[in-house]
Image (cartoon, helix red, strand yellow):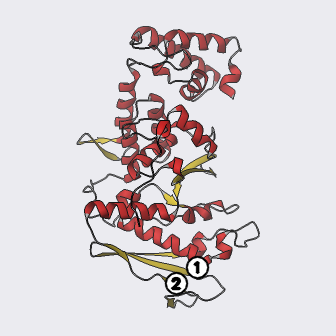
Amino acid sequence: MSTDLATTAGSLAIQPDQAMWSPEQRAVLAQSGIDNDVTNAELASFLHLCQRTQLDPFSRQIYLIGRWDKRQQRKVFTPQTGIDGYRVIAHRVVTETRQAFGYEDTLWCDQSGQWNDVWLSEQPPAAAKVTVLRDGQRFSAVALFQEYVQTNRDGARTGMWAKMAANQIAKCAEALALRKAFPHDLAGVYTAEEMAQADNPQAERHLRTVQADEPDPWATPAIKGRSQPAQDVADVATQTNNRGVVQDLYRQANAEGLLAETVKVDRELLELGAYLIARGKELATPAPEAKVVKGVIVEDVELPTDEHAAAVAALRTWATEQGITDIDADAYTALGAPLDAVAPAAIWGLLSALTDGTRADALAS
């Protein structure tokens, strides 16, 4: 089996140092089902994940799937791949590290608790067990059928869960075992088989995850008090140059209770909330731009700090008065660029149009 990842050439190619999706990439992602409900933070996190896993969304190796979340009262987008994507990552890692890699026989459990190495019954198994072998260590995982099966409103199994139930639950167990064996490389992305249950009508999402006390002997040594989700947020904030993305990351971390977590940035241990605030202030200072987007970005000229800051402050004050909570993202849509990269004249022009009502539809759309 080849471990080489398919790559997209031309304007869609993802660059290692890329901080945000380009307009061309964003347009193609929209065709895959990523609609306007997605947040800048989710898009930035998805880009970071694609770079880290080396899976190509434009070759359909990885997806960003939106599902309604009752707790957040909005559509939440989750990175998702197939079991083949997990296998590609695992094979690539062991090839690079020259480690041994393999599987023990897959086992299925019946309702009485008896394990079988082949499933012949027409009834679905109660569970499946997969054991991954990495460099002499065993990583076993059990997936319960009732926790992953996809059903319709009447409770009947649907899709491949109705046709190949044993195969589907085995894929879930394999994904769990691979994530135990490769926790750093597979963190933050789930397989389509695992996420199928999240589409059940009126069902709460339930995913079995690797326990916090299960070590990864090949990853960077763990830091006490540090959680992987918090570190992922910090990594995205470090790579992006978009202040709006950092603001979205702060809101996301606050909603998930991660602001007090300890993260590592440039070999320094910091509190996530304090780092995001500092990073946002750092990006608030306009930087020279060398690209024109919709005629509003200054080319090769540093934006006047005082005038630019005054224009942004006026726009945000107006937004607060109008009850608009995310003016940065709305202004991005209206102007085609982040506020930090837009000329003061364009911001004043937008504010003028908004106050007389001529551009209100631009923010509402």
Quarter holding the C terminus? top right
Q: x, y (%) of residue 242?
A: 44, 29
- On the picture, is 45 further left or further right than 362? left
At x 39% / y 61%, what residue is drawn? 3
**Residue 259 appears in the rendering:** no
* Residue 166 - label: 1
At x 55% / y 74%, what residue is drawn? 169
Q: Are marks 1 and 2 in contact (CB under 8 Å)?
A: yes
Give the answer, above or below, for where 56 lies relative to 159. above
Give the answer, above or below, for where 254 lies relative to 346. below
Q: x, y (%) of residue 212?
A: 37, 63
| Residue identified by numbered label 2 | 108
Give the answer, above or below, for where 200 lies relative to 41. below
| Label 2 CA crowd tier, 10 Å (few <14, some 14–19, many 20+) | many
Disc 1 or 2, which lies upstream in sequence? Answer: 2
Quarter holding the N terminus? bottom left
